[in-house]
Amino acid sequence: DQQVKQNSPSLSVQEGRISILNCDYTNSMFDYFLWYKKYPAEGPTFLISISSIKDKNEDGRFTVFLNKSAKHLSLHIVPSQPGDSAVYFCAASGYGGSQGNLIFGKGTKLSVKP
Amino acid sequence: DAGVIQSPRHEVTEMGQEVTLRCKPISGHNSLFWYRQTMMRGLELLIYFNNNVPIDDSGMPEDRFSAKMPNASFSTLKIQPSEPRDSAVYFCASSLRGNGEQYFGPGTRLTVT
């Protein structure tokens, strides 16, 4: 049973517009969430994270929102750029991330069209 | 900083052969993770080490898989004997314990024919 779900396998957005990637989780013990970006033939790279004590974390064009009651988080990219085209993975961990054991979703492929 | 280094980048082998994948974590990181990525199952954690000690190997699919970390700068993942269903991309990642951010290597694409 998947504990971290990304229900949209792909998303297409026009350059300059907002990209919204969604992620749902089932395990209420998760208290630390991360987003990774992956280009073809490369390993995933860390993008942004959020602790469950917050509901929003922002880093430049990237913002992650956490809704604990709904067990849902989302990544907003504004404005989207062609270089953002990649597969985005949501990941979750318990114990504030201190255990380091991440559970990943299956990813959403984002295509940003010029 | 060279990042996490994995070798080989590509491996093609025949069923029944032994395969050894190698990983050098980022210097100073004390946690190391081995993942497998497939289309069907996505990115799965196989095993992770803290301070060279295996902590959780519940993701290792079966006894054909084994992993070692003889020192802080080197780890291996071995498959013996290999089977076609082992074909996947294997990633190694490292992190500082207490920090959920993991840094991934470029992966090894394994094909077992």
Image (spheres, coloured by chain):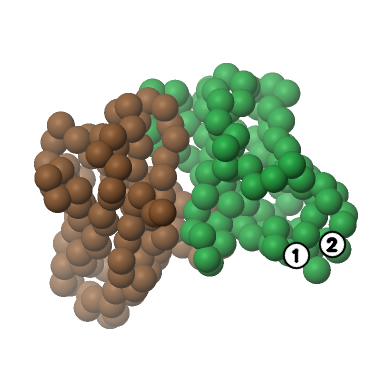
Chain colours: A brown, B green
Q: Is residue B47 found left or right of A15 in the rendered image?
A: right
Q: Mark 2 highlights which residue? A: B15
Q: Badge 2 local density, few (<14 within 10 Å), some, or many (20+)?
A: some
Picture coordinates of residue A37, whole percent (x, y): 39, 55
Seen at 80% across and 68% down, the residue is B113
Q: Is residue B90 found left or right of B82 in the rendered image?
A: left
Secondary structure of the residue carrying numbered label 1: helix
Residue B96 to residue B38: above or below: above
Secondary structure of the residue carrying numbered label 2: loop
Marks 1 and 2: in contact by CB < 8 Å?
Answer: yes
Seen at 16% across and 72% down, the residue is A17
Residue B54 to residue A114: above or below: above
Residue B48 in view (yes/no): yes
> Mark 1 belongs to which amino acid?
Pro
Q: Mark 1 highlights which residue? A: B84
Which quarter of the picture shows residue B53? top right
Total of numbered circles in the picture? 2
Seen at 33% across and 32% down, the residue is A94
Q: Could you say which is closer to the camera, residue A88 or residue A18?
A: A88
> Mark 2 belongs to which amino acid?
Met
Badge 1: chain ID = B
Picture coordinates of residue B76, whole percent (x, y): 72, 37
Picture coordinates of residue A30, whole percent (x, y): 29, 37
